[in-house]
Image (cartoon, rainbow, N blue to C red):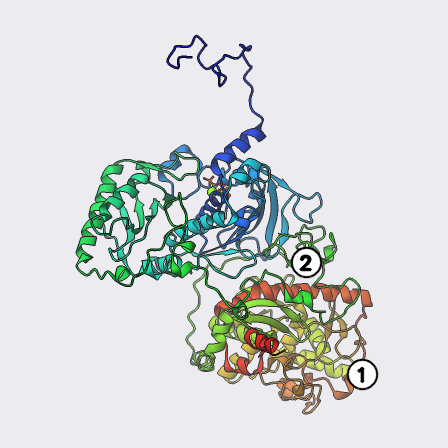
Amino acid sequence: MDPLAISDAPSGTKRRADGALEAPKPAQRIRALDPDVVNKIAAGEIIISPVHALKELLENSVDAGATRVEILVKDGGLRTLQVTDNGSGIQKDDLEMLCMRHTTSKISTFEDLSSLATYGFRGEALASISHIAQVLVRTRTEDDHLYAWRVKYQDGKLVPGPGGGDFTGPRAVPGPIGTQIRVEHMFYNVPIRQKACRSHAEEFRKIVDMAGRYAVHCEGVGFSCKKAHEVEEYVPVDCDHTVPERIRHIYGSNVSKELIELSVSARRWVSSAKGYFTSSNYHTSKTTLLLFINHRCVESSTMKKALERTYTSFLPKGGRPFIYLSLEIDPARVDVNIHPTKREVQFLNEGEVIQAICNQIESQLAAVDASRTFLAQLSGAKPVEPLDEDAGNAAPKFTTPALRKVRRNSNELVRTDKSQGKITAMFTPAGPAGKGDSPAGPVDKGDSSAGPAGKGDSPAGPAGKGDSSAGALEDEPYAVPQDTTYTTRTHEPAQINYTSIRELRKEVDDDINEELTKMIASHTFVGVLDETRRIVAIQVGVKLYLVDYGSFCCEFFYQRGLKDFGNFGVINLEPPPDLTEIIEAGIQMLIPPIEHRQIKRYFDWCTETVKGVLVRRREMLKEYFNLEITPDGKLVSIPLLIKEYSPTVRKLGVFLCHLGRVEWSEEKTCFQMILKELAMLYIPEPLPTSLTGKWAKSFSWSDGSSVTSGERSSPFDPEDDDDDDDCWDFTTPMSWEFGPSSDAGVEGPDHEKAQSPTWFRRSAESEGSDAGDGGQVMTEEEFCKLTRIRRQNVRYALEYILFPAFKKRLTATNQLMEKSVKEVADLKKVYKEFQRC
Ligand SMILES: Nc1ncnc2c1ncn2[C@@H]1O[C@H](COP(=O)(O)OP(=O)(O)OP(=O)(O)O)[C@@H](O)[C@H]1O
Ligand SMILES: [Mg+2]
């Protein structure tokens, strides 16, 4: 058949390969496509491979104001792609529509597009991802006090999450402020797309390349990118790194040491042009161009060719540069809406802009050309070949020596992600091993006792063990803390400049132990080993340490108290309890009641004395500590030392009793004693080991719950046990609360002596007595249940609130180094032992 012959067939009719016409068909009816088909087609335009999903997730994190973005990848992102940020989080009420198409918080009218200040605007990314993968979201805003929400999506809709039965709504889980989005089994329903993806290694390389670009550009945001179950960091960037530092960490020092900063003054068409480009001392075989227009990572082959042309007169034949460019152009002159993946943008005066940039680079290159050292050529180093054949731009990890996989000896490998398995899973916990008390095991579904008291059928609950997927969403059971409402104070903070406080602060500064402070700042939390002896395991580098968290908490809260002196937050107690009642409970915890008229009178006298002291000192306590007491003896408020954590009410009685012994006449001692007592109040309560015996004196508390008291000593100092009668030494905080039972120095009911500490000590005879007479004795089962809840609360606080806070703010002291930290394993030494064997 003559190919040029004009066919008689109606236009638009399909031809067979041999050119024969198909039999004419009746006209087909036009139908609206099923929304599911539409969604899948649309998703296919936006998410072509895992790297496109990553780009969307990164942009969302940056839009949410994150300063830290962590990427975790399994099987090139096809199995798991997880992005965790510390941004604003997503409101619980918005979760239902999070993955619906065209739902966004970023624009509301079409006109908003011309003044866009965010990456996102279409409300399509997450919807698209949810149509080709399963999406798990954990998010928490500042308003979600203490816990995060977890949801799962498929095809744009909420579906039951792991271990969630039929329940599709948000489930409360522990988690920091921010959002974690985990995309799993990408393209599980589009096999053709899955096959089209390159090897896992290739997909991972593209992911690292994309993460590297954003990490260079997004100043103020720290990045990390890892493969699941590996410790190697591919994009190791901290939030305070400068752009050249970022380039060095990602692309290596070969690139960074040859960087020249672009200096272009603002022009009519471009409000700002920043960037770095390599001098003629550096070249490789493919151009790496990191181009951002209005902070959007874009590609421009025109720009790339023009830049390569500019470099031809400076580099050897075939040599190519590294260039990072960030242009800001009036949004009204840029059209971002021309490509489904937003990879391309169109802007007015493109030619003019490119020319100006090239001219500037050319003149700066010429200026430094005189100092050209030919270092690369002289040293005989081969230019590093990028492996990414078609992208042209090198993926950082694989293009520079700095990012080449550094082989590490296995005795140097360290775990840096605390979510990768828990040491606690290997321990039998201290404490009662009663029925159902299995802290490391799963908690029964629907067991409301695992949630906060009184939460009833709240969705709050521990992460189910059925959640087989890795990462922070999978965890041991914790009790989700109670919801708390915070209000922000409007008045200006008080300026306190007392000599006494300055001196106390200086004492802390003088005792600083730099080494331990650094260790704590870089530790990885391993797990709580023993809530009775208050021991936590942490990892620092290749070493494992046991830490006495009681002492750490005491020091930390004492330092917080000193820092915020006069400006504490407030925990309001509603309705205000009666001081008498609390103090009585405190005395009972310290000295179990004995049914004897004389002693009863003595207890009453103690209660009245402490109450009298506190009521008399109430103005000072209110002014400096926000501890408010009414003239008729009601406790209105206590100080709040850090947000999201409040002391257990069980310790309040002992705290007030100990306040009664403060030396009020000397300013510095007085402030110090109160701050130390406050710090001790804030130490998480120790858990009892058994229902009976000297560790468990039960008392009833006015809210109906039972409390226990017991004694303990430093976990690392068994010699110190119960005989240390210096319970006023604040530097050994562990011994005060369940202090020695010596009755040495017990004072009589003399008003002046009432401030002496010793009259709260339990007499030697009383030690070992059974549950307090006046108390209500629990059954074994109740005891186990209560202990389990308390253990979960303590664990949650330690892992998610206290140790992260130590990391940021604790100035560790020599005292802590000496008494409260023990190295228990050094991987290198362990290896040596093995080798000997
Ligand atoms: N990491 C995150 N932190 C806080 N909010 C987020 C995060 N990711 C998504 N969101 C919220 O979910 C909404 C939908 O996100 P999605 O990426 O689907 O759309 P978008 O960012 O608004 O637009 P685009 O489709 O152009 O990316 C966002 O508008 C934002 O409010
Ligand atoms: Mg988005």
Mark 2 vs ligand 1: CB under 8 Å?
Answer: no
Q: Judge by depth and name the residue closer to the eye, 102 or 25.
A: 25
Residue 184 percent coordinates (x, y): 58, 46
Q: Residue at x 42, y 50 (%)?
A: 209
**Vertical relation: 438 (above or below) 598:** above
Residue type highlighted by circle 1: Arg
Q: Judge by depth and name the residue closer to the eye, 507 or 277.
A: 277
Residue 39 percent coordinates (x, y): 54, 32
Picture quarter containing residue 353? top left
**Vertical relation: 192 (above or below) 322:** above
Residue 505 percent coordinates (x, y): 45, 78
Please tell me the numbered disc located at residue 669: none
**Along the horizontal axis of the image, is 650 left or right of 269?**
right
Residue 201 percent coordinates (x, y): 50, 50
Q: Residue at x 52, y 41 (%)?
A: 126
**Vertical relation: 222 (above or below) 516:** above
The quadrant of the picture occupied by the N terminus is top left
Gap between marks 1 and 2 measured at Cα: 40 Å
Is residue 567 shown to the viewer in this render? no
The quadrant of the picture occupied by the C terminus is bottom right
Residue underneath mark 1: 597
Q: Judge by depth and name the residue closer to the eye, 201 or 714.
A: 201
Residue underneath mark 2: 452
Residue positioned most to the front:
1
Which element type, helix, strand or loop, lies under badge 2?
Answer: loop
Mark 1 closeness class: few <14, some 14–19, many ≥20 residues within 10 Å: few
Residue type highlighted by circle 2: Pro
**Along the horizontal axis of the image, is 568 left or right of 355?**
right
Which element type, helix, strand or loop, lies under badge 1?
Answer: helix
Of mark 1 and mark 2, the one earlier in the sequence is 2
Q: Judge by depth and name the residue closer to the eye, 132 or 252.
A: 252
